[in-house]
């Protein structure tokens, strides 16, 4: 067993596709993988035309699991067929979104599933080099993935002339150095090139001008882990697992005030209420639910009244939030939402790369304001100022990190304004019953 | 187990080995989309900005298109010529059919685009950015150098955000001294990254990086704790706020307390325009304030900081007259009297052939012209020369012979050239502006750079092809290129490829600008020109001379056998031209060249020597006694140089900052010096010459240097320039034609090979140039 607690949840409601091998002994090894359909999809893909692979993925309704939820096959189709520069595929394993921890078991328990997915994506766009960009703190995963890569090389699943198809593909890992921003695709590319992890101006998008100026596809670990299943079982099968335009299943990471925290593989479109109450066992100690972050800290929070929503990209977007990265954070009635806002902002202020003014200065300002507000220094104008500052960030930054910082703040300021008023009236936090320091 | 996992997170250095066959291209390059290119070939694009329609070339950035419509979009990180950043978000505008505001600095115009730059949303966004910038800004405008010329002040003045809602303690980092010339004040920095880019993309030095992140991001030196760079101060110049300040200017004055005079840098031969800012009759700053002229905002360390020799307390401010073996201060009257008397004595006793004159590389054209007149008429000798640092005569001769005198390249020609060949010289050190323009041509227009040199020089980084030849091998290489003689074994010792690919590459180019240094002189120049003119297109030429008016010294005929405008002295018609102008006979025999003059001084054949703005003792490494046989030595100088110390009379001369006149750069472009100040006790060489001529019995009618300039325009071939163009501050190109006698001896042409931080005598008296650590490095050290 790995050197830490197993993060996987266990629920009869789960539909296990990408996590189906997780429980097998020695699941990360190539032998176990081969015994359970391993590299069959690759064999199948190499026998089809690259464009057909792309179409299959497109039709499966697979959408990016990194956060933005863009149709993966569509993204691949933007890569020009002919390119003077080398093409690349990059796997985004920088998983840093607070509340999100799903890429971790995918690499830990089934690295070959990911590797197979990457090779197929490389074949689809006719790239011959791939990179797995692993967040620096996932050092122990790096070792697992590197071991898997070595095995794959040794057995001819990587390198020259894969499975006798004439297709060459090389793949290696690269570590980040601990910056959330390096999960943003263009910052990741810069970091991979050895530059500072600052995002690039878009357009041009990486599919056209990416790593080293070549066309590049960047996908999340979970996105790519789905690929072998789509190829093996067909787009139709995959699409039917989920809801319309939201194919497949997804790993949801339940955390916070929930009885059975853990990672659960559930079909796209699974109702949030059931996810909390049935899968996660509800809010512990009989407390009432107050708020839910549906997809990692970058998403606007939902109130307890808003949880009757299907967990797919479109449904969550319809009620003004995002499915994001699958990190579902549950908060009970004792949670101070001012403190939550301050804590989230502390993360973004710490992680803002500092490239552009609104995010650099805005997050730092909001963090200090919200923390002061919560710890007894509330001023009457603060909530309005904070809201305005957040709006001054929103939509004006170079990369989406600014939006990610602004949106939860705005949602908390709007949906939980009364908690701010209470702090103001009392002069201290009503939940902690005294002036506190959150520093 | 848990602990182990945790610990290993922090061991990130021993990365597992990577597969060997990584498909990764060579050096890391920045995305080309960061420097968009205009596409003049494509159909122009028409866009509507605030209701005004403008038609601009395809590829134009919205912010530039707006400028053409007369609309200013505020910007910080955008800086024309540097890569795009999209960082400051000041330039957000509303574009119809786009959901969010867009940055005008990164948006390329598209057909039919409708843009609004003054909607409430846009105005609020601008105000918001300024409010953000001011949150941690110290607002110490009252003590900030930049106060009054700060782009942050200007924007807040215009767009508001004067009231703050920011109630938190401001972040603070201590000020850092990056070098003796550059200081960095973190709280004022708005992180526009202009400094980082100008240093990298403009100077190819890359001294700056960014440290930390988020609100604590700061500009840091890339090589250790302090700057290791060319110290050009371009970063200070482009900084929109008072974050980067100059070691020579900081806390000295307020911008509105100075007077500004646009003039020309007096150091190298490139002729950068600069503005001297003067307060209380003292220069406090130099920058090309209006960015006019061919150098734009560029100045190298000498231009930006090396003017301080003017303020040096070692300046001579009273004439020195040798009495009983010792130099003692005297009055101008007395000194000029001594000079006239002693000259008269020598002339009477030994005749004009015993008198000689050495001129300067820095004095104005007018002064040089008059010095020629004085020597040839008043003194009656052609013993006249100067330290020649490039063979302009041979270039003029070669181009004239083949009727190609329209092929002198200007600085602009270098910048616009599709192909550039540099033979010899190290422009990075000796001609910083030329090097800058070559780099810009390569970076911005993909110009091809060919280098032929016996030294390893920094421009090799930009070179398409370079050939390194053995020491002094450049002339042989030219002959080999031209097919005059086969390259002999051992000629080529390095470079990017062989000789043939170098030549073939050049044969495929067109409109090449050929730039050469002192390595090519005499007949070699003719070989180079003949071969160069046979290349495709309009080949143009530049000979690189060391100092601010090296070219002017040659143009004005500070030579023993050449009259102004490269007219050959032995030719009667040439002499007659100036005899008519000067109403005096010119001796027919060519005089002694500079080496012969100095030998004559030692042998006793030369009895009296007048030296103007030159230090031959140092330049020619003369032993101390060499000039001691002279019956009379007069030196007009700014400083007590080695030559001045040997003089019988030293006349304290004015510097470039204390006189008017014109100078001609290496490319033959004439520009005007303006006089922002005076230095008590000094006189210009022009004033000295007028006084001497008068005392020696010649009545000259000039009232000012303007009168001399008018005569030059009328008399000197190639100098028939339009005065108004000159007076409004343009650099006016000259195209001299003439067939001066062939170069008598190659050793008459040699460059001082100054480094970035030296400039002959002058740099020795500059605190700034000597204060930087880089100046102490071995010559040629580059970053
Ligand atoms: C600030 C920021 C951080 C991000 N971090 C991650 C990350 O850690 N992992 C990830 O897969 N995508 C991350 N993304 C999303 C990526 O930019 C990109 O959309 C994603 O890798 C695309 O893959 P997908 O289409 O498979 O989702 C981040 C985006 C932003 C703006
Ligand atoms: S939004 Fe934030 S993280 Fe993104 S570029 Fe701007 S400062 Fe960096
Ligand atoms: S020091 Fe000046 S030029 Fe450099 S980033 Fe800061 S504000 Fe911009
Ligand atoms: S490049 Fe030459 S002319 Fe220009 S500033 Fe430097 S020394 Fe002066
Ligand atoms: S000027 Fe456009 S983002 Fe800075």
Image: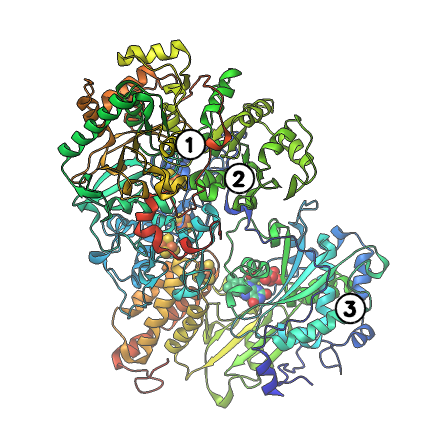
Could you tell me residue B93's position as x and y percent?
39, 46
Q: Is mark 1 within 8 Å of ligand 4?
A: no
Judging from the image, what secondary structure is the residue with disc 1 in? Answer: helix
| Residue nearest the observer in this picture, B139 or B350 | B350
So how many labels did they put on this image?
3
Could you tell me residue B580's position as x and y percent?
29, 10
Q: Nearer the viewer, mark 3 or mark 1?
A: 1
| In the depicted structure, whether residue B157 falls above or below residue A373 | above
**Ligand 4 picture quarter:** top left
Chain ID for label 2?
B
| Residue nearest the observer in this picture, B762 or B255 | B762
Q: How is the image coloured?
A: rainbow
Q: Quadrant of residue A7?
A: bottom right
Tags 3 and 2 touching, CB below 8 Å? no
Q: Is residue A54 left or right of residue A95?
A: right
Q: Which residue is mark 2?
A: B442
Query: How far apart are labels 3 and 2 at the CA level?
Result: 45 Å
| In the depicted structure, whether residue B310 falls above or below residue B145 | above
Residue B45 seen: no
Chain ID for label 1?
B
Q: Which residue is mark 1?
A: B595
Q: Which residue is mark 3?
A: A152
User: Mark 1 or mark 2: which comes first in sequence?
Assistant: 2
């Amino acid at each position: 067993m790995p050197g830490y607690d197993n993060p996987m949840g266990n629920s009869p409601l789960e539909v296990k596709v990408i996590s189906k091998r997780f429980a097998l002994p020695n699941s990360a090894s190539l032998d176990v993988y081969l015994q359970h359909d391993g590299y069959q999809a690759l064999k199948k893909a190499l026998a089809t035309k690259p464009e057909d692979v792309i179409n299959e993925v497109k039709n499966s309704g697979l959408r990016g699991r990194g956060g933005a939820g863009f149709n993966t096959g569509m993204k691949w189709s933007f890569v020009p067929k002919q390119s003077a520069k080398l093409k690349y595929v990059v796997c985004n394993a920088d998983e840093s979104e607070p509340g999100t921890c799903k890429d971790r078991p995918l690499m830990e328990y089934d690295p070959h599933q990911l590797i197979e997915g990457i090779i197929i994506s490389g074949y689809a766009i006719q790239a011959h080099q791939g990179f797995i960009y692993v967040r620096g703190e996932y050092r122990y995963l790096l070792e697992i993935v590197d071991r898997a890569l070595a095995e794959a090389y040794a057995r001819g699943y990587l390198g020259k002339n894969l499975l006798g198809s004439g297709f060459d593909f090389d793949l290696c890992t690269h570590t980040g150095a601990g910056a959330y921003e390096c999960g943003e695709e263009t910052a990741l590319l810069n970091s991979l090139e050895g530059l500072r992890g600052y995002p690039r101006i878009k357009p041009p998008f990486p599919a056209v001008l990416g790593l080293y100026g070549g066309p590049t596809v960047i996908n999340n670990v979970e996105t790519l882990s789905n690929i072998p299943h789509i190829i093996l079982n067909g787009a139709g099968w995959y699409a039917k697992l989920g809801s319309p335009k939201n194919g497949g299943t997804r790993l949801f990471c339940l955390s916070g005030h929930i009885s059975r925290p853990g990672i659960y593989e559930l079909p796209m479109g699974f109702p949030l209420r059931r996810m909390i109450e049935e899968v996660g066992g509800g809010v512990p100690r009989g407390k009432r639910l107050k708020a839910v972050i549906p997809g990692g800290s970058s998403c606007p929070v939902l109130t307890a009244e808003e949880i009757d929503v299907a967990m797919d990209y479109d449904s969550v977007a319809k009620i003004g939030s995002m499915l994001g990265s699958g990190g579902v954070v549950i908060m009970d009635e004792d949670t101070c939402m001012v403190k939550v806002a301050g804590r989230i902002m502390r993360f973004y202020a710490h992680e803002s790369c500092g490239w552009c003014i609104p995010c650099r200065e805005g997050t730092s300002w909001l963090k200090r304001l919200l923390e002061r507000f919560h710890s007894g220094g509330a001023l009457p104008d603060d909530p309005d100022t904070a809201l305005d500052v957040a709006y001054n960030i929103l939509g004006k930054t170079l990369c989406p990190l600014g939006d990610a910082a602004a949106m939860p703040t705005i949602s908390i300021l709007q949906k939980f304004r009364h908690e701010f008023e209470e702090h103001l009236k009392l002069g201290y936090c009503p939940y902690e019953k005294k002036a506190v320091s959150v520093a | 187990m848990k602990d182990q996992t945790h610990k290993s997170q922090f061991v990130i250095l021993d990365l597992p080995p990577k597969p060997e066959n990584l498909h990764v291209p060579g050096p890391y390059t920045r995305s080309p989309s960061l420097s968009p290119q205009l596409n003049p070939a494509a159909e122009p694009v028409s866009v509507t900005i605030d209701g005004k329609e403008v038609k601009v070339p395809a590829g134009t950035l919205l912010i530039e298109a707006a400028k053409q419509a007369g609309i200013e979009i505020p910007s910080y990180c955008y800086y024309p010529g540097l890569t795009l950043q999209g960082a400051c978000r000041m330039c957000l505008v509303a574009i119809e059919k786009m959901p969010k505001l867009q940055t005008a600095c990164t948006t390329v115009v598209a057909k039919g685009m409708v843009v609004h730059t003054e909607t409430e949303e846009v105005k609020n966004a601008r105000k918001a950015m300024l409010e953000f910038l001011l949150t941690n800004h110290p607002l110490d405008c009252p003590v900030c150098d930049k106060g009054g010329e700060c782009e942050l002040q200007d924007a807040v003045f215009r767009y508001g955000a004067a009231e703050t809602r920011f109630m938190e303690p401001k972040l603070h980092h201590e000020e850092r001294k990056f070098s003796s010339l550059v200081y960095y004040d973190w709280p004022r920095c708005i992180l526009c990254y202009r400094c980082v880019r100008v240093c990298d993309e403009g100077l190819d030095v890359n001294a700056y990086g960014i440290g930390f992140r988020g609100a604590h991001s700061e500009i840091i030196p890339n090589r250790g704790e302090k700057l290791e760079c060319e110290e050009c101060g371009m970063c200070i110049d482009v900084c929109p706020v008072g974050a980067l300040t100059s070691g020579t200017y900081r806390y000295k004055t307020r911008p509105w307390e100075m007077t500004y005079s646009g003039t020309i840098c007096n150091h190298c031969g490139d002729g950068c325009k600069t503005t001297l800012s003067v307060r209380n009759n003292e220069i406090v700053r130099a920058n090309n304030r209006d960015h006019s002229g061919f150098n734009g905002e560029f100045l190298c360390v000498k231009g930006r900081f090396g003017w301080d020799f003017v303020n040096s307390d070692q300046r001579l401010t009273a004439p020195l007259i040798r009495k009983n073996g010792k130099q003692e201060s005297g009055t101008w009257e007395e000194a000029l009297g001594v000079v006239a008397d002693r000259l008269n004595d020598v002339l009477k006793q030994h005749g004009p052939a015993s008198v000689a004159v050495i001129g300067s590389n820095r004095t104005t054209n007018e002064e040089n012209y008059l010095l020629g007149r004085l020597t040839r008429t008043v003194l009656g000798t052609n013993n006249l020369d100067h330290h020649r640092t490039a063979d302009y005569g041979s270039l003029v001769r070669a181009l004239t012979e083949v009727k190609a005198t329209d092929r002198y390249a200007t600085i602009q020609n270098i910048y616009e050239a599709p192909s550039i060949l540099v033979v010899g010289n190290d422009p990075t050190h000796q001609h910083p502006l030329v090097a800058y323009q070559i780099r810009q041509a390569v970076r911005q227009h993909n110009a091809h750079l060919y280098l032929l040199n016996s030294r390893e020089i920094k421009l090799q980084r930009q070179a398409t092809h370079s050939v390194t030849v053995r020491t002094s091998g450049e002339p042989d290489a030219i002959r080999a290129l031209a097919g005059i003689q086969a390259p002999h074994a051992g000629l080529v010792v390095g470079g990017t490829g062989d000789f043939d690919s170098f030549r073939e590459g050049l044969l495929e180019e067109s409109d090449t600008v050929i730039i050469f240094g002192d390595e090519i002189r005499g007949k070699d120049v003719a070989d180079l020109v003949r071969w160069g003119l046979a290349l495709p297109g309009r080949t143009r030429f530049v000979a690189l001379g060391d100092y601010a008016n090296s070219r002017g010294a040659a143009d004005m005929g500070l030579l023993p056998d050449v009259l102004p405008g490269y007219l050959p002295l032995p030719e009667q018609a040439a002499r007659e031209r100036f005899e008519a102008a000067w109403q005096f006979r010119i001796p027919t025999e060519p005089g002694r060249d500079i080496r012969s003059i100095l030998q004559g001084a030692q042998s006793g054949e030369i009895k009296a020597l007048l030296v103007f703005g030159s230090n031959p003792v140092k330049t020619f490494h003369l032993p101390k006694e060499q000039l001691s046989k002279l019956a009379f030595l007069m030196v007009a100088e700014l400083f007590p140089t080695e030559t001045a110390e040997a003089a019988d009379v030293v006349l304290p001369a004015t510097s470039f900052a204390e006189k008017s006149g014109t100078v001609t750069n290496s490319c033959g472009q004439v520009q005007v010096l303006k006089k922002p100040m005076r230095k008590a006790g000094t006189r210009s060489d022009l004033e000295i010459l007028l006084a001497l001529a008068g005392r020696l019995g010649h009545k000259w009618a000039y009232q000012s240097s303007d009168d001399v300039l008018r005569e030059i325009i009328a008399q000197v071939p190639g100098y028939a320039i339009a005065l108004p163009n000159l007076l409004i501050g343009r650099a006016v190109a000259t195209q001299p034609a003439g067939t001066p006698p062939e170069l008598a001896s190659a050793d008459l042409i040699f460059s001082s090979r100054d480094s970035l931080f030296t400039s002959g005598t002058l740099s020795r008296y500059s605190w700034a140039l000597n204060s930087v650590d880089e100046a102490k490095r071995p010559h040629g050290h580059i970053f």
